[in-house]
Image (cartoon, rainbow, N blue to C red):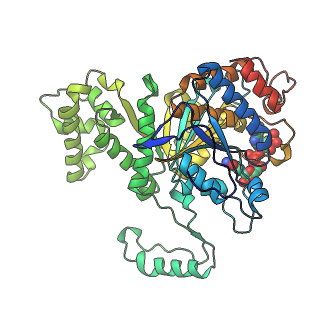
Amino acid sequence: MPNFEKLNNPTEGELISFKDGKPIVPNNPIVPFIRGDGTGVDIWPATQLVIDAAIKYTYGTKRKINWFKVYAGDEACDKYGTYNYLPNDTIEAIKHFGVAIKGPLTTPVGGGIRSLNVALRQIFDLYSCVRPCKYYTGTPSPHKSPQDLDIIVYRENTEDIYMGIEWEAEDENCIHLINYLNDTIIPNSPKLKNRALPKSAGIGIKPVSKYGSQRHIRKAIEHAKKLSGDKRHVTLVHKGNIMKFTEGAFRDWGYELAINEFRNDCITERESWILDNVENKNEISIENNARLIEPGFDKLTQSKKESICEEIKNVLLKISESHGNNQWKKLVLVDDRIADSIFQQIQTRPQEYSILATLNLNGDYLSDAAAAIVGGLGMAPGANIGDKAAIFEATHGTAPKHAGLNKINPGSVILSGVMMLEYFGWNEAANVITKGLSKSIEKKLVTYDLARLMEPNVDPLSCSEFAESIIDNF
Ligand code: NAP
């Protein structure tokens, strides 16, 4: 147990441990919680009430969460001193107990203070941000068929522009870097020809590594393996047509992982096409078959033609036996889509998608766009998951103007609690909450944000009344 400066060690409950990146959860785990700033004062008590009630309703006295209050944000400054937004006690507690849940935290503007949310993700190497977007019947939505969307965005959390490595225009180091790139690196990179960066540009770096991409995509595939039917599907979302060595590499490393590490569980879209369409598997006229899958095959270089032929041969020889005759449909399908097209497709063909694995910036935009379709931020949960820790949180912020009014929608943190229960393997309790939430919404027993969008308008419940209504509808 850590030596806390200002926290009293919990007297009841047991530790969650981790093995191979997965949690081993006792029946009475200790779970640190951060209440959160702003509307956290309203949302957290409502959330705790619902989670505790669901566990009691489902498991009686057999299971119980022992909540352990830790501090971050404004509350931490009150307890630990000015500007101590993320005390060491909190970091040590999460490190020790492994799984935490939090309300929203203010990002102080200026003063050189980094986002606390980003800091927590980086300190604990929570490399996958998981954001499910699913429709609950009755939720007002701007979309005609929001029920068709049921996706989970896997957003990489530690690389890409999230690393925040950038230099302001005119800064001395920025000018130095631009000169070095223009004078040395670009002339030595034949493919870049005689391009040059504008002298007055600001510069940001977008690092994407094979290690970082694959550990993230691995989590997405592991998740898809637990789903059933068409939902066993991972789409690698990227902008590889433009950013070949970062976004494009993310896609390639994803396919490589699927084929090498998950050979018995995954099939790529291209492989499934070959199995379904390339005939005459024993006497393969490879060139003819390759022509089928590669438009413009005749114009390709000889080595590219050979690699396509080799690919077809490999698929037919290696996996047609076990995965032919539609057997591949039992596997996790791995395909890829360009980022801009997926924004269209989650609106026009949402039922075709399940897990979208992507880099940081794409995932940020995509998860908010998807949340809007199913009812907005008040219903959008999230989890940040690593190999030795996980933090569950709402996707929205502190909404300061609504703070302390017992008015705001606690749905997002409650649904983050549902994700936490699923992470524990306590699916029965998780299902009880989603059932209660769905029924409450169907009966139009909702907070102001949803009530004002319902037609005709309904009288809103308060934050705490909404929590009670969820429990009444278990
Ligand atoms: P925000 O707190 O998300 O609030 C913007 C608006 O979204 C609110 O005014 C409200 O709209 C709606 N909203 C937010 N939470 C809601 C909920 N639970 N139920 C229903 N509607 C909800 O965004 P912000 O005002 O830009 O950010 C405020 C602070 O939060 C900033 O310091 C920011 O850095 C921080 N932040 C923290 C996190 C985090 O902790 N993960 C995430 C994002 C932002 P109406 O007023 O129209 O009803």
Q: Residue at x 80, y 33 (%)?
A: 449
**Residue 375 seen in the current view:** yes
Numbered disc total: 0
Residue 357: horizontal and vertical position, in percent? Answer: 48, 42
Front-lying residue, 92 or 153: 92
Image height check: is 205 above or below 282? below
Q: Is residue 149 above or below residue 183?
A: above
Nearest the viewer among 232 and 147 is 232
| Residue 289 in the figure: left or right of residue 112 | left
Q: Residue at x 12, y 30 (%)?
A: 283
State the image quarter where residue 78 is shown.
bottom right
Q: Residue at x 39, y 43 (%)?
A: 20
Q: How far from the left and from the top, in percent, is residue 289? A: 22, 35
Residue 453 in sight:
no
Q: Nearer the viewer, residue 417 or 260?
A: 417
* Quarter placement of the C terminus: top right
